[in-house]
Amino acid sequence: MLTWLQRDSLNFPPLEKAMREPNGLLAAGGDLSADRLVQAYRHGCFPWFSEGQPILWWSPDPRTVLFPDELHISRSLGKLLRQQRYRVTFDQDFAAVISACAAPRDYADGTWITGAMQDAYRELHARGHAHSVEVWDQDMLVGGLYGLAMGQLFFGESMFSRADNASKVGFASLVQHLREAGFVLIDCQMPTDHLHSLGARSIPRREFADYLARHLDQPNRATWVYQATLTPVAYT
């Protein structure tokens, strides 16, 4: 039975109560307050719903993740990184990145990143939880992604690309930075061919919950400041 959340409580049901069909639907209702969103990620679930639907909270089993040491750089992407065609920055234009991620896609009808969702994550960014990666071709924003950093875990939310491999360049740069900063896992939520091509794989939900328990409150060395040229020189 689906649990309906109350606005006066931030508690979520145990992950084991998530539905098998649709996979991972855990709860509905509540709100998109910053406190609830932080609690959701700490609990192991995330919001995902379309305009006109109630707020839906998900915790799929298995969970798609990427371990920083398992990032796969294809030959073509490695060549692009060495050419330094794009410039990568962090937290320079969060609003522009989430707006671009919410823009219509050729392969999808509508967007799950509603206006209310954008407002909520901009508040998380203002509080220092959510971060953006921007990919620039000179002064033009051509790609990027955003997500949340908590402890030694990064929770990826969405990415976009307006130029060849721009989002992959941003993702590879982020992964390098997270690896050097002591992060142990990047949550990718749901499987896609794009993520699998970069090295993402699925793990049981109980294993994901164990990572939450062990690493959410551990320190990291990430710095979310302007990076004029962040080039993953380790990948050749």
Image: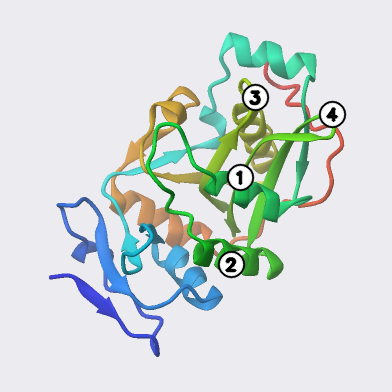
Given the image, on which type of amino acid does mark 2 rest? Asp
Q: What mark, if any, has residue 126 been given in the picture?
A: none
Q: Is residue 12 above or below residue 138?
A: below
Scheme of image coloration: rainbow
Residue highlighted by disc 2? 119
The N terminus appears in which quarter of the rendering?
A: bottom left
Q: Residues within 10 Å of mark 3 (few under 14, many from 20)?
A: some
Label pair 2/4, CB-CB below 8 angstroms = no
> Nearer the N terminus, badge 2 or badge 1?
1
Is any part of residue 181 visible from this angle?
no
Q: To which quarter of the image does residue 174 belong?
A: top right
Given the image, on which type of amino acid does mark 3 rest? Ala
The C terminus appears in which quarter of the rendering?
A: top right
> Nearer the N terminus, badge 1 or badge 4?
1
Q: Is residue 168 left or right of residue 62?
A: right
Q: What mark, if any, has residue 163 been given in the picture?
A: 3
Secondary element at image label 3:
loop
Q: Position of residue 184 (x, y in %)?
A: 54, 45
Q: Is residue 85 above or below residue 162?
A: above
Q: Residues within 10 Å of mark 1 (few under 14, many from 20)?
A: many
> Nearer the N terminus, badge 3 or badge 1?
1
- Separation (CA) of disc 2 from disc 3: 26 Å
Q: Position of residue 103 (x, y in %)?
A: 54, 45
- Separation (CA) of disc 2 from disc 1: 14 Å
Residue highlighted by disc 4? 138
Viewer-closest of 142 and 90: 142
Viewer-closest of 134 and 205: 134
Is any part of residue 125 visible from this angle?
yes
Q: Residues within 10 Å of mark 4 (few under 14, many from 20)?
A: few
- Separation (CA) of disc 1 from disc 4: 18 Å
> Nearer the N terminus, badge 2 or badge 4?
2
Residue highlighted by disc 1? 100
